Image (cartoon, grey):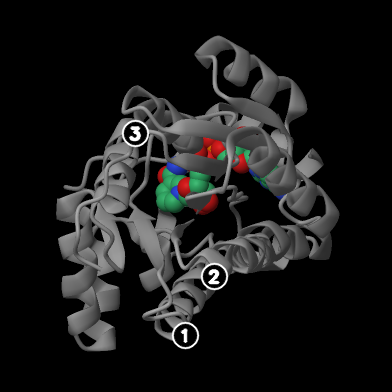
Amino acid sequence: MSKTVSLRGKVVVITGGARGIGLATAISLAKLGAKIAIGDIDEKTVKESGTEQDFDHYGRLDVTDAQSFGTFLDDVERELGPIDVLINNAGIMPTGRLVDESDQITRRILDINVYGVILGSKLALSRMLPRRNGHIINIASLAGETHIPGLATYNASKHAVLGFTDTLREEYRGSGVAVSSVLPTLTNTELGSGVAAPKGLPAAEPEDIAAAVVRLIAKPKAKARVTRAAGAMSVFVNLLPQAMGDALGRSMGSAQTFLDDVDADQRKAYEDRVRHS
Ligand code: NAD
């Protein structure tokens, strides 16, 4: 996975592309000449974003529904040609203590963040392997290699995405299909609203994650951690003995960041959206 690839004319599908990291990534890739298809469960917003940005294809896509996902990819291939890159980006992050989390929300997090990524990867592989060409990029999180009170199910989902993606990369090594994960730190989108960044590690902007995805497509590699500082901290913490790593996390405020320190008023619109979509 080392040669540099041109983005011009590449067909790129981005799930959850109506807003946030997915939309910023779509805009960055479109500027470089890629053909962009965004799909999102929020039909109104995906159509607004698609029209505003004049993307090549946009519409409703539910990553938890095999029929919806498959039909979306078929439509893209019919209109734009073979899919070069699938970015499995759709995800939700309800916050709070596990004892207060309804079963419906637990299942929804796993359904979108884990099953959606597995399903998308399967659908992409079945199209890309016969052509011996393609790139699957799964948007995980630095939460996938750490543990943060208030995010237990979300943490579990992102750990799963990382394990899944690393496994696929080895399973399809030498097949012509590249498989990568992106691990953003807290990023200024609606998903992170009302949550303060850890001490000493400023939040990223969606454009920072988009830039990392652009670099990843141009030059595929296994993982991209964003920001560089937050990524280095994550790698470092994982080298420490457990008790020391946990203590360092607490000293940076992690025990309350996603619990008592959340600004519930600022976060309300996001929590309402993901709990009722
Ligand atoms: P966001 O809420 O701004 O955008 C996510 C989009 O996914 C929304 O438009 C939503 O409608 C869509 N979506 C939700 N369920 C869907 C479904 N079933 N099918 C299709 N689309 C669906 O969030 P974001 O911050 O842009 O997050 C994008 C990805 O980045 C997520 O996987 C998230 O876990 C990850 N991430 C975000 C942050 C952060 O702090 N913002 C940090 C690390 C990782």
Query: Residue at label 3?
Result: 8
- Residue type at mark 3? Arg
Q: CA distance from mark 1 to mark 3?
A: 29 Å
Q: Secondary structure at mark 1?
A: helix
Is residue 208 shown left or right of residue 240? right
Q: Residues within 10 Å of mark 1 (few under 14, many from 20)?
A: few
Examine the rendered structure and indicate whether residue 232 appears above or below residue 162: above
The quarter of the displayed image where residue 44 is located: top right
Query: Residue at label 2?
Result: 129
Residue 131 location in percent, x, y?
Answer: 52, 64
Query: Residue at label 1?
Result: 171
Q: CA distance from mark 1 to mark 2?
A: 12 Å
Query: From this viewpoint, is residue 250 visible?
Result: no
Is residue 66 shown left or right of residue 92? right
- Residue type at mark 2? Leu
Is residue 37 shown left or right of residue 251? right
Residue 90 location in percent, x, y?
Answer: 59, 47
Examine the rendered structure and indicate whether residue 264 appears above or below residue 119: above
N-terminal label among 1 and 3: 3
Residue 54 location in percent, x, y?
Answer: 54, 14
- Judge by depth and name the residue closer to the eye, 69 or 5: 5
- Residue type at mark 1? Glu
N-terminal label among 1 and 2: 2
Disc nearest the viewer among 1 and 2: 2
What residue lies at 76% left-to-right and 56% top-to-bottom? 64
What residue lies at 28% left-to-right and 60% top-to-bottom? 220
